[in-house]
Amino acid sequence: MANSNQYLIEDLSYTNSWRLFKIMAEFVDAFEKMNDLGPAVSIFGSARLDPEDEYYRMAYDISNRLASYGFNIITGGGPGIMEAGNKGAFDAQGNSVGLHIKLPFEQKANNYITLRCDFRYFFVRKVMFIKYAKAYIVMPGGLGTMDELCETLVLMQTQRIKPFPVILVGRQFWKGLLDWMMEQMVSRGYMKKSDFSLFCMADSSHEVVELIKSKVNLHSFQKNGTACREPDSSQNLA
């Protein structure tokens, strides 16, 4: 009689092989939906904030202003900061993109998305955040926000993607983390002080919008009055 463990290994191998097609399908679907999007800004932050929170209101104002200037807005498509970002773009009649992830809690798609992509795999979703964004806005948040921030900084630090503006919103919120990074990571040689140049900080929606306008030339993406993609060499992902 054949060893039962042999069948278990074969079944797992079969499952993993077919999972590749699910992953590929998510990439293809998102690429097809977003390929003609044009210049966009990705906004990250906590899903747990309500509309009365100061950072919710700030995210709304930032996305509303950026959308009125012609930027497309990308969020995770859920509640909290994501909802604020999508709502701001929606109210400005701009493209409001939601990269929705299926989770057992918290993540429910908001009602202000004009272009929606659904994901099962986090890493596929994060590729889309990076590939189509010309700037990152990182609002206060939890582990998911930290994950997205750190991965972006690592990709720029290792030159896997081209540098682009990463703006941490709320100096007081981020101060403790940055102090710890300097005291523990820089002092021990785990990172360089120059790595702090990979991002900047802001405290107001006006400051964020002006930073992006000064660093991203929106007119370079326009052709005959419509949004167009840059050549392949300009793509964030190599």
Image: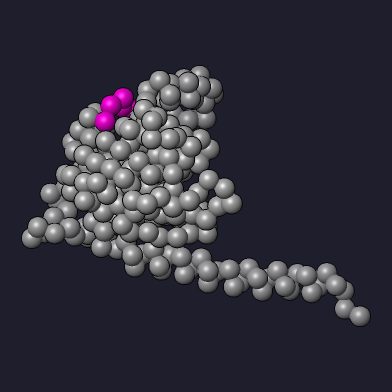
Q: Residue at x 41, y 68 (%)?
A: 28
Instruction: Using the image as rendered, state which of residue 164 and residue 65 is in the foreground.
Output: 65
Q: Is residue 22 above or below residue 139?
A: below
Please report the residue visible at 18 percent of the width from the left and 44 percent of the height from the top: 68
Which quadrant of the rendered structure holds the C terminus? bottom left
- In this rendering, position of residue 113 left or right of residue 100: left
**Magenta region:** 200-205
| Residue 124, horizontal then vertical, whole percent | 47, 58
With 64 as the anchor, is 194 left or right in this view? right
- In the image, 39 versus 77, the foreground residue is 77
- Image quarter hosting the N terminus: bottom right
Q: How many marks?
A: 0
Is residue 53 part of the magenta span, yes or no? no
Which x, y percent locates residue 27?
A: 43, 65
Q: Nearer the viewer, residue 44 or 214?
A: 44
Does residue 201 show up magenta in the picture? yes
Q: Residue at x 33, y 47 (%)?
A: 86
